[in-house]
Every structure is written in structure tokens, then in C-alpha cells.
Image (spheres, helix red, strand yellow):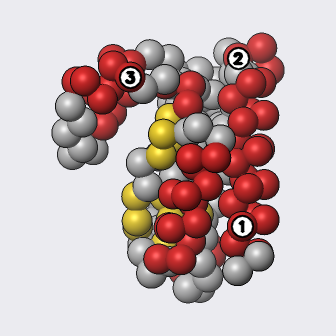
Amino acid sequence: MDVIGWGWENKDLLARLLKRGGYDIPGKILEKMDPAKFLMPSLAEESEEMYETIKNCGRYVEFTLLLRKSSGKVGGSDQVPFARKNITWTHFSGGIKKYNHQPGDSIDKINFDMLRDIARLMYTIAFTYADK
């Protein structure tokens, strides 16, 4: 998990990111979305069971999830060493902020309600997956 206490600042920023990523989400759907309840988790391409678990668990805590399958073997995120050893992985990240890893990156920027909700999502995923 990375910057999970940060929600998306607004729907316009979220819409631009989605469009840049090749996701053409209709405006009617974007209007209904709450940026603070939107996550784009990445997960290992071969992990169909984990994909279904995350998708179903997102509904329990009312998140809108856009699941992306990936090799995960490039980049600087924490999943890379796992992906390179073919260990199933997932990567959850919150919204992108201009002050990430800058002096303005401080605790007062954290959305604690979102952090709590993501912790509930992670618990639900871990419990559900372990119970299979």
C-alpha cells in the first residue's frame, strides 16, 4: 500500500488520469463517483482468484475499484521484487498529490476517513482470501 490516506483531489483530475490511462469512462458515471472512494489497485496478471476477491470485497466497503492487471516487474513500487520472483502481489495506491515526497508532504494532508475505509477493505480482502 502506498499513499493510501490520499484521496483524489477532484473529479477533473481523476477523469484526466483515467483518460490518459486509456480508460474512457462516460461522464454520467464520473459524475456519480466520489474521488475519495476511488482506487486503482494493480495486481499480478495471473492472479484471477485475487482479482475476483478484490472486486467483490470493494463492494462491501463501497469503493469504486478499477482493477488493473500488470506484470509488476518494472518501476519503483514495492511490488517489483515480488513480481520478479513470480510471487502473487497487489499494489494499492491513493491519489497523486503534487507534494508527494516533498517538504509539504505532512500528516495534515492525510484523509483519515479514507485511511480507515482502506484498512477495512484490506481486512476484508485478507479475511476473504484466507478463508478460501
Q: Distance between the residues labelled 1 and 3?
A: 28 Å
Mark 3 or mark 1, which is nearer the start of the sequence? 3
Dot 3 alpha-carbon crowd within 10 angstroms: few under 14, some 14 to 19, many 20 or more = few
Q: In which image quadrant can residue 27 be found?
A: top left
Front-lying residue, 96 or 65: 65
Amino acid residing under circle 1: Thr
Q: On screen, 31 above or below 52?
A: above
Q: Are marks 1 and 3 in contact (CB under 8 Å)?
A: no
Q: On screen, 14 above or below 78?
A: above
Disc 2 secondary structure class: helix
Q: Is residue 93 left or right of residue 106?
A: left
Q: How far apart are marks 3 and 2 (CA)?
A: 24 Å
Residue at which label 1 appears: 128
Q: Do the residues labelled 1 and 2 touch (CB within 8 Å)?
A: no
- Is residue 53 shown to the viewer in this render? yes
Residue pictured at 56% horizontal, 71% vertical: 50
Image quadrant in which the C terminus is located = bottom right
Amino acid residing under circle 2: Lys
Amino acid residing under circle 3: Lys
Whole-percent x, y for residue 116 in the image: 78, 34
Whole-percent x, y for residue 39 in the image: 51, 41
Front-lying residue, 110 or 61: 61
Mark 2 or mark 1, which is nearer the start of the sequence? 2
Mark 2 or mark 3, which is nearer the start of the sequence? 3
Residue at which label 2 appears: 109
Disc 1 secondary structure class: helix
